[in-house]
Image (cartoon, rainbow, N blue to C red):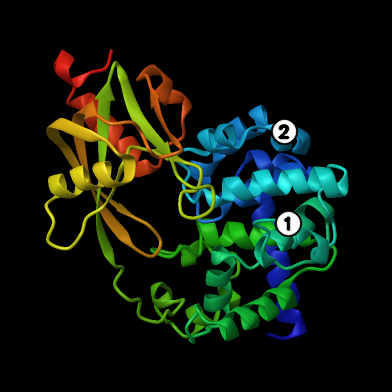
Amino acid sequence: MNDADLTAFRVALMEWYQTHKRDLPWRNTCDPYAVWISEMMLQQTRVAQAQPYFERFMTRFPTVRVLADADIDEVLKLWEGLGYYARARNLHRAARRILDEHGGRIPDERDVIAQLPGIGPYSAAAILSIAYGKDEAVVDGNVIRVLVRLFLMTEPSDTPAFRRRAGEMAAFLLWPGRAADFNQAMMELGATICTPRSPRCAVCPVRHLCGTVARMRNPETLPCRRPRRARPHHAMTAGIILHNDRVLIVQRPMDGLLGGLWEFPGGRLQDGELPEEGFVREIRSTFGLEVGGLRYLAAIRHAFTHFEITLHGFLCEWISGERAYPSAVWVTETELAGFAFSSAHNRLMTAWRENATSAQLRLL
């Protein structure tokens, strides 16, 4: 791409963006805090799903101080359903760091902001460019797709070498002094025109400069990726244990997968073990309880990034024993609404309530 093409690309993209950009709440402000929250939510989450969460989050936690002073359980509850809960935990941790180390002001230097929990190269570039006007090129999934098709980059996109090259190409295209709008225009182009499936090449503002269009390649074949290994599958159990109008729930360790979320007690099945056998064994060995009146509620499939599970859900009654797990508590059905649960366990709760056709199946 020569200088004339580069200028033409920038102008065409920006003119298109000013006319066609979506009206999104985080685009109506340059407040670094709002930009930070929106960028964390938009990681691995579609705009349509993130928008109502952003609005609720900003209403409840309007400043760094309010977020830092909040209880992590409340933060997780507000995040419930958005997934990738490490983002919420990192926001909370980072807010406390920002308050303690930076007087409540989000840093405007790359090497400083990159030290905050959850802030990677993409997030740092987005915050610095959009909130502070720094000439930092953003490279997210949408931008990568635009770059790959624009420059007809055919090497696998999931390698360190490719990511370095993509960063160089994004920096080459960046319009100095207009990084905030330019970065958002690139992301908007990838999200609304240069989409993974059925891209709208006919209305693309930069199609006359696109290598994929010029060579009549199928854009849906790009970016290229190395073959993925099949995700392992785990069989899990969980049960709603009733006792004295209460149900037992347990909080996951704060660090690790789904850290800080609550769930119904259970565990992983051993090879060759029936679901009901594995559930009773886990409840006895891990929680020190004996249960009876076992009823099968549902088989719930759920996919994580690197593995899949089938959660076998049960309903049962406490017979004897004292809870031996430190983070396990008995709560009423009404109180359940105040705890943040993972998607799979929320579905188990729904299955329980949908099958609650008699007093024996309900708490209240």
Can residue 119 be seen here? The reply is yes
Residue drawn at 73 percent across, 75 percent down: 171
| Quarter of the rendering containing residue 100 | top right
Measured along the vertical axis of the image, is residue 333 above or below residue 89? above
Viewer-side residue, 300 vs 217? 300
Residue receiving disc 2: 69
Measured along the vertical axis of the image, is residue 143 above or below residue 264? below
Q: Amino acid at mark 2?
A: Asp
Give the CA distance from mark 2 to mark 1.
Answer: 17 Å
Q: Position of residue 20 (x, y in %)?
A: 61, 50
Q: Position of residue 364 (x, y in %)?
A: 28, 12
At numbered mark 1, what does the secondary structure look like: helix, strand or loop?
Answer: loop
Residue drawn at 41 percent across, 61 percent down: 305
Residue 116 circle label:
1
Q: Residues within 10 Å of mark 1 (few under 14, many from 20)?
A: many
Residue drawn at 47 percent across, 38 percent down: 80
